[in-house]
Image (cartoon, rainbow, N blue to C red):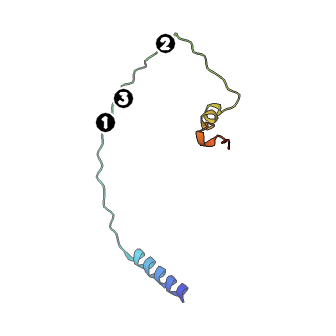
Amino acid sequence: MKAVITLTVVFFFSVAAIAQNAEEKKVSTTKATVVLNSTANKISKSEKEVARLYLFKNSRIKKELAFKTKRNRSKLA
């Protein structure tokens, strides 16, 4: 009985949704001119930096996540 009522309600709402005649509004568009000024800026860097290579990809993240608090320590009885 519950399934029959549910199906009739769904059918009723779907027919009501299809029966609506919504008029489409036309949108007025405007044209805008865009001027791009592109200049290339060269930045020369004379400093040399050394990059560290780690064996594991997420070593810094794993180190930060492996912190210990006072509650993690074992207590002596």
Front label number (3 vs 2)? 2
Q: Residue at x 61, y 36 (%)?
A: 67
- Assign the N terminus to one quadrant of the image: bottom right
Query: Do tag 1 and tag 2 residues touch (Cβ < 8 Å)?
Result: no
Q: Quadrant of residue 40?
A: top left
Q: Residue furthest bottom?
A: 1
Q: Nearer the viewer, residue 8 or 50?
A: 50
Give amino acid for label 1: Thr
Q: Residue furthest right?
A: 55
Q: Would you name the residue on which mark 2 appears?
A: 44
52 relative position to 7: left or right:
right
What is the spatial separation of the Cα atoms under label 1 and label 2, in whole angstroms?
35 Å
Q: Would you name the residue on which mark 3 appears?
A: 36
Give amino acid for label 3: Leu
Whether 58 is drawn above or below 77: the answer is: above
Q: Residue at x 50, y 12 (%)?
A: 45
Give amino acid for label 2: Ser
Q: Would you name the residue on which mark 1 appears?
A: 33
What is the spatial separation of the Cα atoms under label 3 and label 2, in whole angstroms?
25 Å
Q: Position of residue 8 (x, y in %)?
A: 48, 85
Q: Quadrant of residue 56?
A: top right
